[in-house]
Amino acid sequence: MAIRVIGKPGAGATLLLDRHPPAVTGDDEPGQVALDLTPEQAEAYRSGRLNVPNEAFSGAITFRGPVRLYLAVDPVLRHLLAVHGG
């Protein structure tokens, strides 16, 4: 899953959740799902405060690929980011 920050190349990351153990790489690595976040959304995401499902379905976030794959892990990622992120 690629998370890109609009207007800030290299500021995002790709989460490789299909690997054991999971890995994180730079945002130049492709992902099955890609989320494009504004810098403000990226900061909220980093601290676990961004509700990606609501933002995606309201059109506030642009995404590509089978977003249902992301939605399956969003609650876990959001919790981990809230506890260990930003």
Image: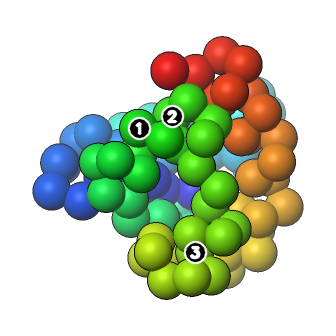
Dot 3 amino acid type: Ala
Residue density around tag 1, few if under 14, some if 14–19, many if 20 or more, within 10 Å: some
> Where is 22 relative to 7, above or below?
above
Report the disc number at residue 84: none
Which corner quadrant of the image does residue 83 belong to? Answer: top right
Say which amino acid is labelled 1. Answer: Glu
Give how far across and how far down residue 21 sits, in percent.
76, 28
Determine if residue 9 is in view.
Answer: yes
| Quadrant that contains the N terminus | bottom right
* Mark 3 or mark 1, earlier in chain: 1
Name the kind of residue labelled 2 in the image.
Arg
Q: Secondary structure at mark 1?
A: helix
The residues bearing labels 3 and 1 have C-alpha atoms spaced at a distance of 16 Å
Q: How crowded is the residue under tag 2: few (<14 C-alpha within 10 Å), some, or many (20+)?
A: some
The reply to whether the C-beta atoms of the residues labelled 3 and 1 are less than 8 Å apart is no
Q: Secondary structure at mark 2?
A: helix
Q: Which residue is mark 3?
A: 56
Name the residue located 48 percent from the left edge and 56 percent from the top edge.
Answer: 2
Q: Nearer the viewer, residue 58 or 46?
A: 58
Q: CA distance from mark 2 to mark 3?
A: 16 Å
Badge 1 is on which residue? 43
What residue sits right under mark 2 in the picture? 46
- Image coordinates for residue 56, horizontal then vertical, percent: 57, 75
> Which residue is located at x 82 percent, y 41 percent?
76
> Which of the marked residues, 2 or 3, is nearer the chain's N terminus?
2
Within-10-Å neighbours for mark 3: few <14, some 14–19, many 20+: some
Residue drawn at x 69%, y 68% is 53
Q: Give the quarter of the image for residue 47.
A: top right
Residue 59 x %, y %? 49, 83
Query: How far, Cα to Cα, is label 1 from label 2?
Result: 5 Å
Examine the rendered structure and indicate whether residue 66 appears above or below residue 26: below
